[in-house]
């Protein structure tokens, strides 16, 4: 029983940590802000929740599990709100959601030169 | 005077205090009760204890919605990971408008947050009857337009 | 397993910093820092398990709340140039 629990929790921790790497890779590789948001949301959902589940399975007391669960609840409500705030601010700030080539910060660079 | 909603807010705050402190000392428990009462009193004076500030009437229906949302999150996580890890990275990203039939602000926020929480789709701007969505793959917008998530959130928020 | 997961999360955090430094737009930087913060929350929790000190979870919870407020504050400051004082 304990061994199965260890294996399950180890698998959750490993997959969660790998998802964090994939998410960071997405934030680096994807071409513009709006697509990078999707890469970032992997870290907020898959990565964070699998790591938390992995830790809950190893928690040695009830209170530790509850605290991890509370971290999960806080992330569950704040992560999409923060993503939406960034996306909406970028939309108002003049980035185009349909044209990745237009979002490379050139206008800003030209403003700096002028 | 003291509604069930006010009482449940007090219970939630007090339970949070107890679970976060984990010390069962009479003085600390009493401090927790006083602090929770103070917060409830201030919230009552600000009149934010309503269906929007403390939506307990949704908790039972949330239990049927969350498993479905979790499954959606798992599926789209896999899809987005595959896109990021594919060497050529052919993207078909774009934005579109998705109808939202929710009648309460809480329902609308739940719908927009569910869209953003699912990797592959992000809510860009929210209006009372439509939501502008950006998707990593345009198929994601078509899927949202088909309206399964919309219908489920509408069913969850209940009557207007 | 905890040490491997911690190592991977630290690597991922270093990778998000690349995006934060490169930009190009300020929104990219704010997004990168937001993801960095989410990873920090989990890194603190993992460090608590690694060193067998569950008190770290309280720090982690506080950081999760601060990260959210910090992102919104940075966005608002960037948009308006102030955090909401009288004109």
Image (cartoon, rainbow, N blue to C red):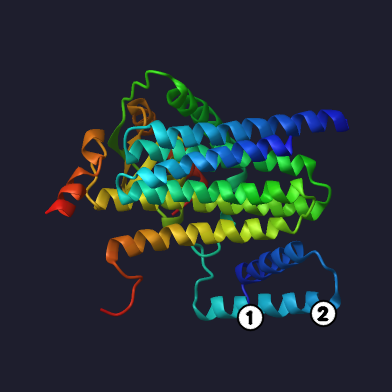
Query: Could one spot residue B117 in this view of the protein?
Result: no
Q: Residue at x 63, y 68 (%)?
A: B9
Identify the subunit bearing mark 1.
Answer: B
Depth check: B137 or B139 in front? B137
**Residue B67 appears in which quarter of the rendering?**
top right
Tag 2 residue = B27
Residue C45, position in %: x, y? 68, 50
**Quadrant of the image for the C terminus of chain B?**
bottom left
Tag 1 residue = B38
**Residue B29 appears in which quarter of the rendering?**
bottom right
**Quadrant of the image for the N terminus of chain B?**
bottom right
Label 2 Cα crowd, 10 Å radius (few <14 / some 14-19 / many 20+): few
Depth check: A103 or A88 in front? A103
Identify the subunit bearing mark 2.
Answer: B
**Pointer 1 and pointer 2: residues touching (CB < 8 Å)?**
no
Label 1 Cα crowd, 10 Å radius (few <14 / some 14-19 / many 20+): few
> Mark 1 or mark 2, which has the lower sequence index?
2
Q: Which residue is drawn at 49% across and 46% down?
A: C35
Q: Residue at x 52, y 81 (%)?
A: B45
> Which element carries disc 1, helix, strand or loop?
helix
Distance from label 1 to label 2 (Cα)? Answer: 16 Å
Query: Could one spot residue B7 in this view of the protein?
Result: yes
Q: Which mark is residue A98?
A: none
């Amino acid at each position: 029983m304990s061994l199965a629990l260890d294996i399950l929790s180890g698998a959750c921790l490993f997959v969660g940590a790998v998802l964090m790497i994939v998410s960071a890779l997405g934030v680096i590789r994807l071409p513009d802000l709006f697509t990078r948001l999707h890469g970032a949301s992997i870290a907020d959902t898959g990565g964070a929740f699998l790591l938390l589940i992995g830790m809950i399975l190893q928690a040695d007391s009830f209170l530790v599990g509850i605290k991890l669960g509370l971290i999960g609840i806080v992330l569950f409500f704040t992560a999409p709100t923060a993503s939406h705030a960034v996306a909406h601010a970028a939309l108002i700030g003049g980035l185009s959601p349909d044209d990745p080539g237009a979002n490379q910060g050139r206008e800003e660079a030209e403003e700096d030169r002028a | 005077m003291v509604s069930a909603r006010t009482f449940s807010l007090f219970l939630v705050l007090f339970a949070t205090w107890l679970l976060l402190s984990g010390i069962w000392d009479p003085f600390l428990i009493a401090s927790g009760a006083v602090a929770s009462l103070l917060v409830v009193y201030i919230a009552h004076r600000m009149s934010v204890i309503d269906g929007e500030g403390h939506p307990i009437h949704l908790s039972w229906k949330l239990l049927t919605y969350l498993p479905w949302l979790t499954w959606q999150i798992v599926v789209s996580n896999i899809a987005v990971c595959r896109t990021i890890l594919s060497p050529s990275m052919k993207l078909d990203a774009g934005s579109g408008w998705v109808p939202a039939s929710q009648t309460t602000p809480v329902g609308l926020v739940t719908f927009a947050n569910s869209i953003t929480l699912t990797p592959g789709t992000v809510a860009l701007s929210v209006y009372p009857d439509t939501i502008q969505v950006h998707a990593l793959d345009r198929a994601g917008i078509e899927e949202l337009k088909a309206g399964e998530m919309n219908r489920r959130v509408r069913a969850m928020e209940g009557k207007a | 397993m905890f040490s491997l997961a911690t190592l991977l999360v630290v690597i991922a955090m270093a990778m998000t910093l690349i995006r934060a430094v490169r930009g190009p737009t300020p929104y990219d930087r704010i997004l990168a820092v937001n993801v960095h913060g989410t990873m920090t929350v989990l890194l603190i929790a993992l460090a608590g398990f690694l060193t067998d000190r569950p008190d770290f979870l309280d720090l982690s919870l506080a950081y999760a709340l601060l990260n959210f407020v910090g992102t919104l504050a940075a966005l608002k400051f960037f948009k308006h140039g102030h955090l909401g004082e009288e004109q």
